[in-house]
Amino acid sequence: MTSPTRESLYATVMDDRGLTGRPVVLEGAGPYGGAEEVPEPLVTGGKKYTDVDQDICGHTERFPTRRWWIAFAVALFFLSFLVIGLATLFYAGMGVAGVNSPVGWGSFIINFVFWIGIGHAGTLISAVLFLFRQRWRTGINRAAEAMTLFAVACAGIFPLIHLGRIWFAYWLVPVPNDRGPLWVNFNSALAWDIFAISTYGLVSLTFWYVGLLPDLATVRDRATHPWRRRLYNALALGWNGSSRAWRHYEAAYLILAGFATPLVFSVHTIVSFDFATSVIPGWHTTIFPPYFVIGAIFSGFAMVITLMSIMRSVFNLKNYITINHMEAMAKVLMLTGMLVGFAYSTEFFMAWYSGSEWEGFVFQNRAFGPYAWAYAIMFTCNAVVPQLFWSKRLRRNPVVLFVVAILVNVGMWFERYVIVVTSLHRDYLPSSWGMYSLTLWDWSILLGSFGLFFTLFLLFVRFLPVIAISEVKGVMDPRVARTVPSEVTR
Amino acid sequence: MKRTSTRGVLGSFFEPGEALAAVEKVRDSEWTHFDLLTPFPLHGIEEAMGQTRSWVPRVTAVLALLGIGLGFGFQAFVMAVDWPLTFGGKPLFPWPSFMPVTFEAMVFFAAIGSAVVAIVAGKRDTVPQPPPLEVPTGATVDRFVLWISATDPRFDAARVTAFVRALGAADVRLVDGKGGRDA
């Protein structure tokens, strides 16, 4: 028996069953005849460069499958909830929503923070993991960035409808006007938020689109219909793979990653300032910026795991999004879950240690008051359930991953619910205490935002390459993936 | 040189290492209007092609400073000059409050500006390319395609073709405006 080489190893790992999640020791493969430890392949199935195109672009070229249509119909059904909910809200006014005194920030703010948080994992995967040279990101970054965009689109709706009179939404932007001009107040965290979210949305879009250019060119070159070729050529801005273009492209991509990284931290920091700069006990804390940023990454990774679990099985992409990718995400989920749990505990410690009566009351009320059920859901889903991932077997079990990710999504929605509602419903004056619950229209708009998210995501997987083809090719072993020239006419 | 409709010469490689070795030989040859079309960026291609690092980061620095200036300047103008108002007893020129928006403006200008500049630079700071719609090269799929443009001052179809063949390229062909024919 000949001793295995990296090449033969990479050519023979066919699917998840061939992966262990640990480096492989190849006896006799080292440079001086000793053992060499090599990482497991990022792409399984012994794929060639041409297979990558076929596997990833193929979905954009065929009539969608029955499963896609069913998913799309369900997403559209939920999207209709959003349309009806918004129409009712605009027609009847804010009275149809659950917010009232004393809980003046309700489901709209909760949903806003929830969706923005979801978006952050996409940027983390595309930018931070890029800077850290984590090559496994190539399998998931495209879809994660798309998720970011759609999550930001969902998030953007909520502050606007929270205004109550959406037709004045443009007052949020400092445009010249005939009222003075009366500008926005740049001392306000809410004004900062407008700039943070819009910059985040636009930079994410740019990052995603720049990453797409080479792949759009791949789709163009596979296309047969002249109109399709022209359309994708225009979208790819005439990309042809020139190394002289790659040179500037790569510099810009690194710069985008370098700016997107602090941007993602700044965005959720500013979102947390919306709360932290107020004087409400439970909001007015210095821990909020890191707590929100970690929570955002945590919830976003849960959403990425949810989407990737579906995508890899529905589109048969298990060779590109392997169980090793899923395990890596599970590790991030467990780490950030513990950080979130740590933040929950720190809040309690500070409530006691500060000696502030108000702070102490708010936290007792949070955990043991009328909203104890919400706190319990939050704590269990976010801090306890991810502890399952100490076990490698569970980290590599797709069903467990999917269930945990869903629970984390639920838990993180409730985290924002707990922060927003429990801090407001019992503040300084017991005479003004009250309770809050979501009305039918709150639920309709919340579910509808999921409809919007999944509609956009399904359209994305229908029309664009869901995996960064050029980046995946870059991490494949050329000795395995190359086309053999003898098969080509000279 | 005869006046022809020739655009240049293409030759394909199937392995990044071979392509890099070949492009180094082209760099050291008499021709300068050459390029390597690849499905993904190759490590070490800039040295192999005799290029320096991209100049885009310098533009980024300028754009970042522009964003900082515009972001900070606009807020200062609004809050301290155009309509000064006291909010919550804060100073009329509360510069620490301007930091978040200044930061976002810097990121906005630097990130989006760099992307635009890099895409434009990829079209301008280059040699004439085979038009992607008319000339299928396979460089977005599995090929690493050497391209020597006919705009090169010392271009001679027969010699260039022979040179590219000698480098070991497969599928060597002359390309004309309509999409090329075999040499």
Image (cartoon, helix red, strand yellow):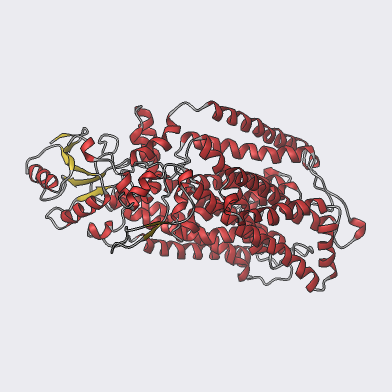
The one nearer the camera, A182 or B160, is B160
Residue placed most toward the observer, A270 or A476: A476
Residue A190: quadrant of the picture: bottom right
Residue A378 lies, in percent from the top left, at 73, 53
User: Residue A387: x percent and y percent?
Assistant: 65, 56
Instruction: Please determine whether, in this image, residue A341 is positioned above or below residue B22.
Output: below
Judge from the rendering whether residue A226 lies leftward or rightward of residue A447; answer left or right.
left
Q: The C terminus of chain A lies in which quarter of the figure?
A: top left
Asked whether, in this view, residue B62 is left or right of residue B136, the answer is: right
Which residue does the image show at 77% across and 62% down from the upper left?
A282
Residue, x 47% and y 39% (percent of image)?
A317
Q: Who's the residue at 48% across and 60% down the image?
A: A259
Q: Nearer the viewer, residue A149 or A40?
A: A40
Using the image as rendered, state which of residue A83 and residue B29 is in the foreground.
B29
- In the rendered view, would you say A356 is above or below B138? below
Do we see residue B44 in this rendering?
A: yes
Q: Quick one: which residue is furthest to the front in this view?
A: A1
Q: Is residue A386 left or right of residue A282?
A: left
Q: Tell me residue A286's x, y (percent).
A: 69, 68
Q: Residue at x 45, y 57 (%)?
A: A134
Residue farthest right in this picture:
A431
Q: How many numbered tags mark residues here? A: 0
Task: Estimate the x, y position of residue A165 in percent, counting from the top left.
Answer: 72, 44
Asked whether the viewer can see residue B110, the reply is no
